[in-house]
Image (cartoon, rainbow, N blue to C red):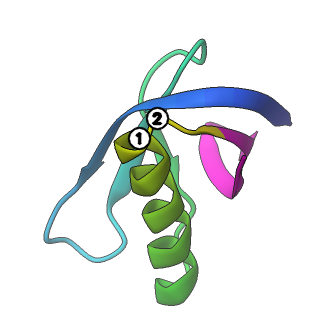
């Protein structure tokens, strides 16, 4: 499901492979970035952190509590 025009309020990553999470405004809890492709995880997490750092909004597609796609506005 797409959630449009949302703020990224926090991001988190660790040294473990493909372990990236974000908190999106008005959506409960931490959401993990979908794993399976190193480049895809990196790209989605880069957009999320840039949106957070620069106070931008995003459109984010979340399925089964996992962030699959994101577009910065």
Element assignment for label 2: loop
Q: Position of residue 43 (x, y in %)?
A: 53, 75
Principal SS element in the magenta part?
strand
Residue found at the very far right of the displayed protein: 1
Q: Is 28 on the left or on the right of 18, as rendered?
A: right
Residue 62 place in picture, x, y as percent: 72, 42
Part of the protein shown in magenta? 58-73
Could you say which is closer to the camera, residue 52 or residue 41?
52
Q: Quadrant of residue 53?
A: top left
Q: Nearer the viewer, mark 1 or mark 2?
A: 2
Q: Is residue 46 left or right of residue 26?
A: left
Residue on which the image places disc 1? 52
Residue 12's disc is: none
Q: Position of residue 2 (x, y in %)?
A: 84, 37
Real-space CA distance between mark 1 and mark 2, rounded to the nearest whole angstrom:
5 Å
In the drawing, what numbered circle is on residue 55? 2
Q: Local crowd at mark 2 within 10 Å, few (<14), some, or many (≥20)? A: few
* Above or below: residue 68 compared with residue 22: below
What is the residue that sits farthest to the left in this orientation? Answer: 15
Eyeballing the image, is 24 above or below 2?
above
* Viewport quadrant of the N terminus: top right
- Camera-side residue of 33 and 6: 6
Q: Is residue 3 magenta?
A: no
Which residue is drawn at the image coordinates 28% and 77% (left, top)? 17
Q: Which element carries disc 1, helix, strand or loop? A: helix
Asked where in the image residue 34 lies, by quadrant, the reply is: bottom right
Find the residue positioned furthest to the front.
54
Image spot of residue 7 (x, y percent): 55, 28
């Amino acid at each position: 499901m797409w959630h449009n025009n949302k703020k990224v309020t926090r991001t988190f990553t660790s040294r473990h492979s493909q372990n990236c999470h974000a908190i999106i405004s008005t959506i409960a809890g931490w959401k993990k970035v979908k794993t399976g492709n190193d480049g895809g995880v990196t790209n989605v997490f880069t957009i999320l952190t840039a949106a957070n750092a620069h106070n931008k909004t995003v459109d984010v597609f979340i399925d089964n509590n996992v962030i699959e796609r994101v577009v910065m506005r």
